[in-house]
Amino acid sequence: MRISEGIHSQAEIPEGCSVLVVGAGMSGLGTALELSERGARDIVVVDPGPFTGFEHRSRTPNTVPLPDTPPWWRSASPHYAELPGVTGPLGGRSRCWHGVLLPVSRRVLERHWPNDTADRLLAEGPGSYRAVTGELLDWQRTCGDARPDRAPDDPREELRALWPDLSLEPVPQAGWSVDGPDGRLVWAYSPLMAWAHRGLARHAGLELPRVVSGPRAISVLVEAGSVRGVRLATPDGGIREVRADVVVLAAGTLENTRLYAQALAEAGDAVTRWPGLNDHVTHGYAVPLPSALAERWTRSDHRFLWSDHEEELNANLFMEVHAAGLAEPVLDLWWMAQQEEPFRDEVRFDPPDRTASGEDTAWAGQVTASFSPADEEEIRRRDEITGKLLEALDVGIAEERGLVDFDPAAKAALATGTAHHYVSRLGTADHEAGTVPLGRRLDFGGRSPSVGNLFVTGPATFPTAGAANPSLTILALAAHTAEAITGG
């Protein structure tokens, strides 16, 4: 059944295709569109998530049950308890993104990433940060709705009076958000919008790849050292095999790691331990604000601000006022930082006995993650900086600390009139990365050197993530993958 133009239910899974993309999130849809633009045809994208709309999830209430978390995943700690990227609606990360356009820093790219990829990201042509940022900002200007509450107020002058040594700039975004009585509404770019004819200008009139909602990939079919397709589990309990000349894994870091590990085993290289897993460390304070400043800031075009501290702290400092669901506006003053190297977190697999289980069984995976002593020390170091900012605001700081997120901290801040500290668990930022890195596990464009015509894309391929939101890099790397597949 056709759900929408180009988007289909599991009943329309084809027997075969030229390119099969596993995952319809930011990386999968972005890669599929880049392939189509380069002349590739017979592209199919499969994803277990149901279709619930084209726009940000806050603007498209979910009325369709999401798929259950597959039984083969578990976490060995409170971190990654939600198993990010494993379940969700069609569109994945792209429908949770706030449009933040921050690149991985030049320092991190030049130190840790392969030269061919870093050079392309830092250049000016297709697949560069400059090109992707430019077209997303053009898209926002030409296709975007106007903010309904925009006001010319700029809180930065008042904030500079409090924090004269802090450089504050509006966060570059392909989108915006506004707090309403029913919650925060976010409007931001998603490659899924191309299927609603609201995508990038260069995608207008493009022959769109077929997207099939419902099936989940169990394993990659490998014969004679090359891919031959993917084995899928359907929501009705069936198993389908789709033959394909090329397979692109874009199913999120955890599932990409599992599928790639199983494909390597089929090619004769069984690897059960995958180190390098890392996520952004997110921590900060929920801060009650003077009502006049909070009101102006909430309605300002400059409501979302940041201060770049990548060089000295490998982190970015953000501040944004939140009002949705709260009695009064609250400032979220938080850091987003890379975990400290060397990364100790990992994914391990327990391959089943195939003589007993057959070929339709996914490998059982376990995530092991924690903050290292170095992570804890850097959290304390960054908290000292924000503590000085809070002193200038003349607000008290509650002593309670723990692994909580912003929302409970905000409610506590309003109840007590003091700033409340929070530290989010690893795996809650949806930025997990690093298990199948470019330059070590993969060649340019995410090409596997071990399994012919197998590619991996998305944050799993990041050698390091730096302090930046991964989405801009994901979209840029989609062009690299498409180029590697098509040869141009």
Image (cartoon, rainbow, N blue to C red):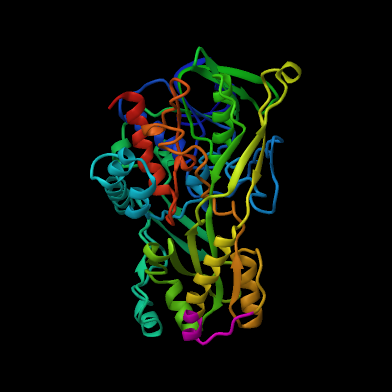
Residue 348 horizontal/vertical position (percent): 64, 38
**What is the residue that sits farthest to the right in this orientation?**
356
In the image shown, does 257 or 213 lie closer to the viewer? 257
User: Residue 22 magenta-drawn?
Assistant: no
Residue at screen point 50% across, 58% down: 185
Can the viewer see residue 135 in this picture? Answer: yes
Magenta part of the protein: which range? 388-398
Left or right for 101, reference 215? left
Can the viewer see residue 213 in this picture? Answer: no
Work out which quarter of the rendered image holds the C terminus and state it: top left
Q: How many labels sit on residues?
A: 0
Residue at screen point 47% across, 69% down: 320
Residue 395 horizontal/vertical position (percent): 55, 85
Residue at screen point 39% across, 38% down: 194
**What is the residue that sits farthest to the left in this orientation?**
124
Residue 30 horizontal/vertical position (percent): 40, 37
In the image shown, does 359 or 407 lie closer to the viewer? 359
Work out which quarter of the rendered image holds the N terminus and state it: top right
Residue 236 horizontal/vertical position (percent): 69, 25
**What is the residue that sits farthest to the bottom in this orientation?**
394
Q: Is residue 54 above or below residue 256?
A: below
User: Residue 394 magenta-drawn?
Assistant: yes
Q: Is residue 20 above or below residue 52?
A: above
Res 216 quadrant in image: top right
Q: Is residue 185 above or below residue 34?
A: below
Q: Is residue 300 above or below residue 121?
A: below
